[in-house]
Image (cartoon, coloured by chain):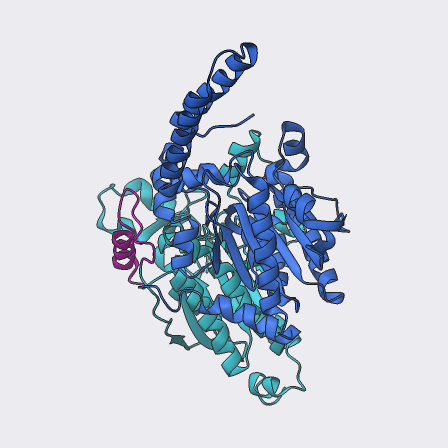
Chain colours: A cyan, B blue
Amino acid sequence: MNWIKNFVRPKFESVFRGKDDTEENLWINCTECGEMIFHRDMDDLGKVCPGCDHHMRLSTKERFELLFDSSYDLVDSPEVPVDPLKFKDQKRYIDRLKDARNKTGMRDAVSIGVGDISGVETVVVVQDFAFMGGSLGMAAGEAVIRGGETALEKNCPFIVVAAAGGARMQEGIMSLMQMPRTTVIIQELRDRGLPYIVILTDPTTGGVTASYGMLGDVHIAEPGALIGFAGPRVIQDTINEKLPEGFQRAEYLLEHGMVDMVVHRHKLAETLGRLLRLLIDPQSSQAKQAVPAGE
Amino acid sequence: MQVYLEFEKPIAEMEGKIAELRAISKDDPEVNILNEVTRLEEKVATQLEKTYKSLNPWQKTLVARHPSRPHFVDYIDHLVDDFTPLSGDRLYSDDQAIIAGLGRWQGRRVAIMGHEKGANTQARLKHNFGMARPEGYRKAIRVMELAERFNIPLVTLVDTSGAYPGIGAEERGQSEAIARCTEKCLQIGVPFVSVIVGEGGSGGALALATANRILMLEHSIYSVASPEACASILWRSREKAKEAAEALKVTAESLSDLGVIDRILKEPVGGAHRERNLVIDQVGDAVIEELDSLSHLSADELRRDRRQKFLDMGRQGIT
């Protein structure tokens, strides 16, 4: 990729083009530095700003495509009771759910994919912040469990790409119960000696971090991702003092020993592949299936 | 001194009057107050019964937080002999928001732990209002491991508005500590009974409540977030806590319907704070019953029972 294409043209053209230009939406502004990026370049870059290296949020599809070597299969998530509490705030939860489904084309926040990463068959579960803030409700919890079960069936590694504001408030206690429920499946993977890797993306907070998000064999964070238990606003309100610079960011967690590494998105698939091959015992049957012949 | 909740105003007035009459008769024994006092006392009893029979979720939240409600230390004082507290997480410090130790629960050897909110200002500060930091959960993990090693049944008493949201807590891995503690709950091969005696606030409560049997006092609450926090997120105003409490279905009755808790323990008319020892004894007996019902299970069966219990949650019985 040449730097003129990435840098100069957007800024240059933005000066000469009117605001109503039909191609305007082909340009995407970096949410951090405002840099304009051509949409096709954006996809090639994995939505990492070429100007400031800011990692923007990926859709589920983009995430699967980033991690898997090539093709992958989607696994259906189980049906769950809808709106267990008949919850209503200013709006009915069932209507919020409908809106989110229409907006995203997804049933809920978590999707399951199976494919190869560096030739190792792996189950990847992706939590999508675009669907009601990625929040962990019954559907999401059940999808994480099904993902884990799929890994158990296939005797292969399990990866969760976490992103969520936390629990799905509108499902009340049933949302909270997804914390122990998902923990059960992680324990079963552990009992079987299957690797479980967590990728913490922006943002991962609340009940997700306080359950499967912090129980990985290896924790990888994306640069700059907000990761924590309580949200910064809640902490600010409680202690009434300014939060330190970089507080709850991926690099801060690395420094405080909560994640193993902060990995640039362009290096993520490669890092995962290397890790999976190091974690899998070549003597076990699972490795025969996982590591291609000739190695 | 009796603390009255906002919805107990009529009761407060009548009991105030009774106290006044008693004071008068003390000064002047000639005045006959007996009839009036009896009449008022009957009225108080009726009013209490009426009020407490139909508490709404927000009122229950207030009862669950009542400053005179029995706390962890009260249960220990009344029910546990030879209580031997164990301190520290062996990593950083001792967090007094969670108390853990060994003792004899009505004579039975147990490991016991729970949140302590504190009954006066000094105690509240010492125990950080029952809001634990990572060290509290790591101490709990350590004592759970110890319980397993020596085959001692585990009892937890849950009473917290939630884990503490602070800089230090985040720095030292609040979420990791809670996740590990919940995981440890699911792992241990000893009978494990949990009672929600006051507030069951979010992950901070869950980390001690992932048990084989979960009991709940009638006016306790258990919720994914405090009504105030939920109101501020979904209604954008803490003032809507009453509505949030309603919508979140925080009461023992709702949670029993949802299959999240196993058993509701009745409270005396007027709430646990009016007859503390009665409630404490009742919790004491119920815990023994539940421990007995688990005693025939092997370590593996106990583990499996717990894992299956949570996996099944929400899969049946909810429409």
A156 relative to A40 in the view: left or right: right
Q: Position of residue A271 (x, y in %)?
A: 59, 67
User: Picture coordinates of residue A204 (x, y %)?
Assistant: 50, 52
Q: Quadrant of residue B229?
A: top left
Q: Is residue B47 above or below residue A256?
A: above
Q: Is residue A253 left or right of residue A158?
A: right
Q: The C terminus of chain B is located in which quarter?
A: bottom left
Q: Looking at the image, which residue is at 74% across and 54% down?
A: B102
Q: Residue at x 23, y 46 (%)?
A: A21
Res A194 quadrant in image: bottom right
Q: As drawn, is A18 to the left or to the right of A63?
A: left
Q: Is residue A94 magenta?
A: yes
* Between B180 and A216, the one nearer to me in the picture: B180
**Image coordinates for residue A1, horizontal then vertical, percent:** 46, 60
Q: Is residue B145 visible?
A: yes
Judging depth in this view, the residue of A123 and A186 nearest the camera is A186
Q: Can you say whether B167 is above or below B251 in the image?
A: above
From this view, report whether residue B293 is shown above or below residue A234: below
Q: Which residues are magenta?
A: A83-106
Which quadrant of the rendered structure holds the N terminus of chain B?
A: top right
